[in-house]
Amino acid sequence: MKSNLENIGLKWIHKNSRIFAILWKPVGNWAVEFVSENIDQYGYSQEDFSSGKMMYGDIIYPEDTDKINSALLECGENKDEQFLDLEYRIISKSGKLHWVAERSLLIRDNKGNIINIRGLILDITEHKNAELELRMSEEKYVTLVEKGNDGIIIVQDDTLKFVNSKICELLGYEREELLGGQVLDHVLVDYKRMISKRYNKTLNDKMNVRRNSEAEFLTKQGNRFPAEISFSYIHHEFKPAVVMTIRDISERKRAEIELKDSEKKYSTLVEKGDDMIVIVQNDSLAFSNPKFRSVTGYQKDEAIGKHFSEFFSKGYRKMIGERFRGDMAKNWTSPRKYEVELISKDNEKIAAELNSSIIEHEGKPAYMAIIRDIREQKERERELLELLEMQKLLVNVINNSPTVIFIWRPENDWPVEFVSENISQFGYSVEDFISGNILYGDLIHPSDIENVKAEVLRCNLAGIDFSYEYRIFTKSGEIRWVDERSIYKRDERGDVEYIQGIIVDITDRKNVNDFIRIEAEVGDFFSPAGDMKSVFEQMLEFTLQIGKIDCGALYLMDDLTGELSMVAHSGLSANFVKSTRYYDPKSINGKLFTTEYPIYKLYSEINALNKDEDLSYEDLKAMAIVPIKHNKKIVAVLFLASHSESEIPSDIRSSIETVSMQAGSIIGNIRDKPQVQKSTDISQYLIDSLEDLFFVIGMDGCILYTNQYFDDVMGYVKDELTGMSLLKLYPQNKALEAASVLADIMAGKKAISNIPMESYDGNTVLAETKFTRAKLNGKSVLVGLGRELINR
């Protein structure tokens, strides 16, 4: 028999190496009497089996052994069975699994017992892998189709061959009720002809219909809903068919109807509202409300008939024209919103948000545009948020950015799921939060936590994004102001899954905004010839102007002894001043005054601690003890109180603490560096004498300082540029290029920029600017020194 098998088709087997021949016994571990030479494709030799060292069962995958035994048992019981057809796995000598298909002849004795199995073994591994990939692909397809928000149907020969879960939900039918029916049975009669026409066109052209259609569908309950339909040509079960994607647009339609009703009902708002409203027809202004004319400075007869693009800055004119014409050509009826820059009659640039839609005006197509003046909004926005939208700049400066990215769980005190590594700017590590040792709520200032919780709840219930400014503690105990912008990510039921947002350290901006007057009022703070007593009295008087407080005192701390001495007071009786002029660091009041954090209480609670002397005669009610720090050390203390108020409101507390932060720097410089103002004045004089463009920017791209020559060339008044993004000084068509160059400079890849800037009145300023990295108040900054290439 072995000789016969060697002769039968052996030559053919050699040519097709994926098949090998084998003769084996179905007993024990299945001894092999013969195997073809090409068994070596699995790492074995004929000798391995013919010598008896290996059995066929040795190379069978263990999990498949029972399957082969079961098949052999069944064949043994069925005496008429002549062949064995089976698929199973074998193991190569290297340990790799191979799928094989066995097609074998069963050799029986006179009693019908199987004594030998003679067969051909075909490697089907590639086929099995292809089947697995196909099955996985089908599973992905089913998930996309069944879990999507759009209804999907397949129509073939005018009959519904497939419907997904969403269309069943929209129409209110079970899947079995829809299959075999016609889609037109569920469409309002007014739309049947259109859908039939689009369906036939898709089949005839054998291509997708580019433009979507709108129609109304009828539900099983007799209700109707509007939908947007797309038509796509496919082959389904080897025959041409059409896939229709059906999207419920009820909400959109409802909004459109409400908008139309609102236009009729509130027409007076057009004339008296705060938004600019215009109608544009044939590229010219056909109507404008009083608000538009007051902002742009044009009279009615001057504005009507004027080409609409002339109301915009040059950089926006082409864009406005192209979008309007494109929308009109596509009959784009949905509102379009984007930011623009208006130009007034007096050439003033006005940041605005334009919301346009196509309407019918006097029987002809036209645009209605609602334009909102967003100058104040733009003034409040941080330039960092604009930089974050520029992806390349974000990638390059994220590690130096003050923006910290968070993902919070919507639970009590907001456990942190993710935080960016630059949380280290506040002294914390990522592990502090991810481990759960610190919750985000632990950082928030006690005076702000309830307000933050209330605002989070309000935004969540209203379904709007969260935007709020509040204070947090750094790991060292320092108070920092942050601006949080967050969005709520919801599941299918509308429940909040997580909160994703950013916080930006705005302490410096707060200091500038809230303390801008103190430097002007106290005058010569840094002058070595100044009267320190007058300085401290003016500082205290300035603080008392905040409101809700009518008296107080300023104490200085002795560096060596820690003693507190009153250096200024206001609104307090002589006896009270005499009793509180000095505090020993070991006394109860001394310890109370030198805590790390502000204290807000009723004075009666503090007075109760003083067993030596009763000071209730002063009749103080609400009071505040606010430490003043310099270089993280207490240098002074503000004691503030009210004779009438029982509580100091949170906004007043914020102002007091803002003053204390700035006062710390002032007092620290007065004590430690009495000559700093003189040196500063000399440096200021030298810098302002330069006839070169000199400026300093932070690592967030915002301008910190400009010299007088820079202000004159760019057409701005003194300090007007402070806080503005440097990118604002480049033409709109150069902004992205400038952002890329600035990112490279911040990363140390470049040091020179030749990109032209644009002055306030639109003139081009050609300059070669060299940037140098420096330190200012302990923070990295870039110092720019530029020279004009062409005189103005």
Image (cartoon, rainbow, N blue to C red):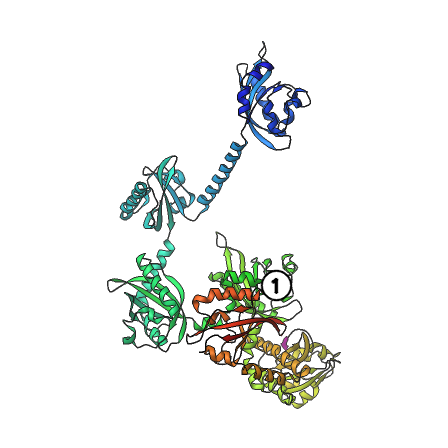
Question: Observer-nearest residue: 1 or 673?
Answer: 1
Task: Tell me: 292 left or right of 463.
Answer: left
Residue at 51% across / 59% down in the picture?
488
Question: Observer-nearest residue: 74 or 186?
Answer: 74
Residue at 64% across / 18% down in the picture?
27
Q: Give how far across and how far down residue 607 sits, in percent.
A: 68, 80
The residue lying furthest to the left in this view is 363
At label 1, counting other C-alpha atoms closer than 10 Å, the crowd grade (few under 14, some 14-19, many 20 or more) is: many
Whether the magenta-drawn stretch holds residue 598 is answered as: yes
Type of amino acid under label 1: Ile
Q: Give how far across and how far down residue 45 sits, in percent.
A: 64, 25
Please identify the quarter of the rendering in which residue 96 is found: top right
221 in relation to 732, above or below: above
Can the viewer see residue 166 in this picture? yes
* Quadrant of the frame with the N terminus: top right
Whether the magenta-drawn stretch holds residue 610 is answered as: no
315 in relation to 215, above or below: below
Query: What residue range appears in magenta?
Result: 595-602
Q: Give how far across and how far down residue 81 sits, in percent.
A: 53, 16
User: Quick one: SS at disc 1?
Assistant: helix
409 in relation to 741, above or below: above
Question: Observer-nearest residue: 670 or 176?
Answer: 670
Residue at 48% across / 42% down in the picture?
140
Task: Tell me: 623 left or right of 754.
Answer: right
685 in relation to 439, above or below: below
Task: Tell me: 717 left or right of 252.
Answer: right
Please identify the quarter of the rendering in which residue 178 is found: top left
Can the viewer see residue 77 in this picture? no
* Quadrant of the frame with the C terminus: bottom left
Q: Which residue is mark 1?
A: 423
Q: Give how far across and how far down residue 262 sits, in percent.
A: 33, 64
